[in-house]
Amino acid sequence: MGRMSQARSAVARAYESARAVTRESALRARADDQNGSYEPDADDEPFEVDVETDTPTDAARTERPMTVRDRDDLAVPRPLRVAAGWSWRLLLVVAGFAAVLWALARLHSVVIPVAIAMLLTALLEPAVGWLRRHGVHRTLAAVIVLIGGLILVAGTLTLVVTEFINNYSDLADRAQAGLNSIQNWLKNGVFHLSTATTAFDILASTFLVLFTLFFFLRDGSKIWRFLVNLLPRAARSPIANAGQQSWRTLTAYVRATVLVAFIDAVGIGIWLTVWRVELAFALAAFVFLGAFIPIIGATLSGAVAVLVALVTNGPVLALIVLGGVIGVQQLEGHVLQPLIMGRAVAIHPLAVILSIASGLVLAGIVGALVAVPVVAVLNTAIRHLTARRRHEPEPPPPEAVIVADK
């Protein structure tokens, strides 16, 4: 019986060796047909045989026979297969991104007011929180803050318009020409508004901003919890934490930007008033608004102040105003920002410029205003989700958002 077992083992080994040689030869011939070379692959294992039972093992029995599709796949070089796999996945990502942009463009009349309402909510929420901590009902607190904000904005606009009227009451013809230019700009410019719908669109957008702002101030946390509960259970906690950190980033961005813009406006307004430049208050208000567009806004608002001084007071005073504008902006950039910002999330200047350009193309001036806050929020959310996935400590909430120098 011992010799019989040895003979069976020898036959099994010979059978296994013959099958391996046959399979390797077939693969070598197939590779030669494809590209003229062959190297054994890690998956090319020999057919296994149980030497004791002389039957194929479980791995061999469960091996799926090669189909026509498998042979077709093997006929395509591996680099081409990998490139094709990446290509269709990238095309799906680009198509999804394009669909989102298309939807935003179609709904810009809704998206832009909601975005503005979110920025105003980040600015006014601390006031609502202070009132609620002192026993005021949340609805009443939201109404008080909303009405107070409206009075402040209306009063500022009234002062600006009054100054324009007082300084240019004797230039009615030029004022009419300017109004016509503004109308043409609204019709064909960055807002893309038609003459018949300009007033209606502005009025509707204003009411939508106020309506959305009221409910964001009153029920913002409830709305966020409702949206998070729509997600799968496993995604709720990380998305909720990332959303909270992103909201803190947005709040820090708005607060710091308002403070810096106010300092710029006061400084340039005082400089213009000292040198008796006309429309000093209106130009200061324009500087305040321009500061909300990083890098570009300060330059444009300062250029407008210099041009007004040039037209109304001559080149010498225009140079003096230019020096004052540059001095205030340098003081703000190198002294005030480091003191105000504290712990901050830095955004690269290239990202800022590209986001402003994209916002300007998609939604005009308003798009340029909201572009950088959107980038800041996405930056914070991605950083926190990445840290959570890598099991790293989550970065602390920022005190401000700045444009990095490097």
Image (cartoon, rainbow, N blue to C red):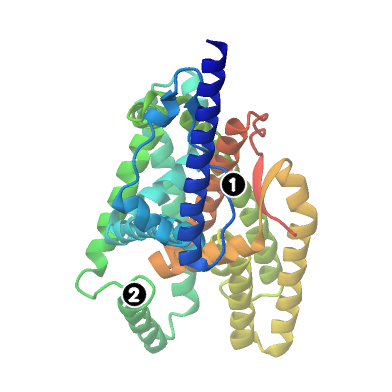
Left or right of 32, for residue 111: left
Q: Amino acid at mark 1?
A: Tyr
Q: Nearer the viewer, residue 359 or 384?
A: 384
Image quadrant of residue 136? top left
Q: Does residue 34 sit above or below 223 in this rendering?
A: below
Residue at coordinates 67% horizontally, 55% vertically from top-left? 263
Q: Position of residue 266 (x, y in %)?
A: 66, 59
Q: Secondary structure at mark 1?
A: helix
Q: Position of residue 76 (x, y in %)?
A: 42, 62
Q: Secondary structure at mark 2?
A: helix
Q: Nearer the viewer, residue 286 or 365?
A: 365
Residue at coordinates 40% horizontally, 40% vertically from top-left? 146
Q: Nearer the viewer, residue 4 or 49?
A: 4
Residue 160 seen in render: no
The numbered mark at residue 87 is none
Q: Amino acid at mark 2?
A: Leu
- Residue under label 1, please give it: 253
User: What is the CA distance from the residue labelled 2 to the residue labelled 1?
Assistant: 29 Å
Image quadrant of residue 306? bottom right
- Residue under label 2, please give it: 186
Residue at coordinates 71% horizontally, 83% vertically from top-left? 317
